[in-house]
Image (cartoon, grey):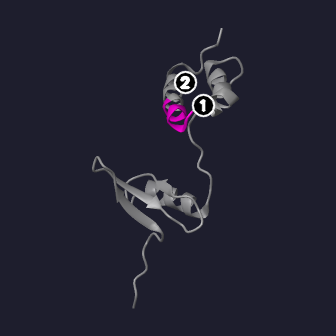
Amino acid sequence: MKLSKPYPYLYRDIDRQGRERWRLRVPGRKTVTVKGQYGSPEFAASYRCAFEGAHVEKQGLVTKHGTIAALARSYLRSASFAGLSPATRRSRRYLIEHFVCKFGKLPRS
């Protein structure tokens, strides 16, 4: 009798800092990182969403008109931002998202 894997298409990766990551690699689809501790209910829910192709909502920019978050979101969607190199876009997006987490609800004034 052959035992089936509890999580098909799931692979363990160790990054260069030695951290363990679990990645779902379904043929024909993009690789998805599964969040949570292996075997936990959070991990099972994350795996199920990734396997079914469900879109997991990311806690990102809350955009209320006239706030710093709305200004940041409009910049991230702009043509000038899209024209930057991928490395520059990544670093700027990281900085902007961290700034918005602290000050995003404040008015733009």
Main secondary structure type of the part rendered in magenta: helix
Question: How many residues crowd mark 2 within 10 Å: few (<14), some (14–19), many (20+)?
Answer: many
Eyeballing the image, is 37 above or below 51? Answer: above
The reply to whether the magenta stretch includes residue 27 is: no
Residue 63 seen:
no
Q: Residue at (50%, 21%) from the top-left corner?
A: 102
Q: Residue at (45%, 69%) from the top-left corner?
A: 7
Q: Nearer the viewer, residue 31 or 8?
A: 31
Residue type indicated by callout 2: Val
The residue wearing badge 2 is 100
Tell me: 6 left or right of 105.
left
Q: Residue at (62%, 24%) from the top-left corner?
A: 72
Residue type indicated by callout 1: Leu
Extreme residue toward the top, this view: 109
- Point out which mark residue 90 bears: none
Tell me: 77 left or right of 89.
right
Mark 1 and mark 2: Cα distance apart in space: 7 Å
Q: Quadrant of the C terminus?
A: top right
The residue wearing badge 1 is 61
Indicate the quadrant where residue 65 lies. Answer: top right
Residue 51, horizontal then vertical, whole percent: 56, 63
Tell me: 3 left or right of 109.
left
Q: Quadrant of the N terminus?
A: bottom left
Tell me: 11 left or right of 26.
left
Residue 70 seen:
yes
Q: Residue at (66%, 27%) from the top-left corner?
A: 80
- Start-end of magenta stretch: 85-91
Dots 1 and 2: beta carbons under 8 Å?
Answer: yes
Q: Kindly state the secondary structure of the residue where label 2 is placed.
A: helix
